Every structure is written in C-alpha cells, then in structure tokens.
C-alpha cells in the first residue's frame, strides 16, 4: 500500500488500485520508513502530569524528616543541621523544576 505526503506533511495511504483515482496533485509518494518518521515527528508530546504529580508527592514525603530536624533545631536556638538543610535545598530545587514542567504541560481537553 503506497504512502503519500502532502506539502504540510499530512500522511495518506491508498490501495494500489485507488492511487490513480484519489491521489491529489502535490502528493509525493514516500516509503514506509519516511511515513513512520513523519508520524513520530507529529506525535503529541506525552502527558506527564500524572508522573510529575506523583514525583512532587514523593518529594513532599522525603522533605518531612529533614524539615522536622531543621525546625526542631531552630526552635531550640541551634543551627539547622547542614545535611538536613542541604537535602531540603536539593528537594526544593527538584520540585521547582517539576512545577515548571507541569505548568508547561498542555491542559487536558474536556469532552
């Protein structure tokens, strides 16, 4: 079954018997590999909202103990434990990047 593309990389395929009847001017015949490459290039970006939300929840969970250690130290007039403070900085840095990626995700369409 021959594959064709138009000038906008729209893909079409026709049975051999239908090519002469349905082929439009400007359509260019392409190989299966070329058609697959166009399909891949035109595929929508994967929706990562669920994955990002799950990772953000995981970061929140991982932040609890170091945040508690920092808060307890500060409440008693001691310096925040450096490893715990650093861990919070690392986790928040990851969360900031994920929230930015989440904001850039296309909104789900509602039927």
Image: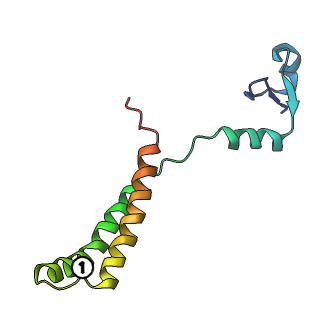
- On the image, the x and y values in percent for residue 90 come to 40, 72
Q: Can I make out residue 49 in this image?
A: no
Considering depth in this image, is 17 or 104 the residue closer to the camera?
104
Residue at 83% x, 18% y is 23
The answer to whether 14 is drawn above or below residue 60 in the figure is above
- Secondary structure, mark 1, is helix
Residue at 87% x, 22% y is 17
- On the image, the x and y values in percent for residue 71 come to 17, 76
The image quarter in which residue 86 lies: bottom left
Q: Residues within 10 Å of mark 1 (few under 14, many from 20)?
A: few
> What colouring does the structure picture have?
rainbow
Residue at 36% x, 56% y is 53
Considering depth in this image, is 38 or 18 the residue closer to the camera?
38
Residue at 22% x, 79% y is 70
Q: Is residue 26 left or right of residue 95?
A: right
- On the image, the x and y values in percent for residue 48 come to 47, 51
Question: Which residue in the protein does label 1 denote?
Answer: 65
The answer to whether 40 is drawn above or below residue 57 in the figure is above
Considering depth in this image, is 88 or 33 the residue closer to the camera?
88
- On the image, the x and y values in percent for residue 80 come to 24, 82
Which quadrant: the C terminus?
A: top left
The answer to whether 42 is drawn above or below residue 51 in the figure is above
The image quarter in which residue 72 lies: bottom left
The image quarter in which residue 66 lies: bottom left
Q: Is residue 61 left or right of residue 3?
A: left
Q: Can I make out residue 6 in this image?
A: yes
Q: How many marks?
A: 1
């Amino acid at each position: 079954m021959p594959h064709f593309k138009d000038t906008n990389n729209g893909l079409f395929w026709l049975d051999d018997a239908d090519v002469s009847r349905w082929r439009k001017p400007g359509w260019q015949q392409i190989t299966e590999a070329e058609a697959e490459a166009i399909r891949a290039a035109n595929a929508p970006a994967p929706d990562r909202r669920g994955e990002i939300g799950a990772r953000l929840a995981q970061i929140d969970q991982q932040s609890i103990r170091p945040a508690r250690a920092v808060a307890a130290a500060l409440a008693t007039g001691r310096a925040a434990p450096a490893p715990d403070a650093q861990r919070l900085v690392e986790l928040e840095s990851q969360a900031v990047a994920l929230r930015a990626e989440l904001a850039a995700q296309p909104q789900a369409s509602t039927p």
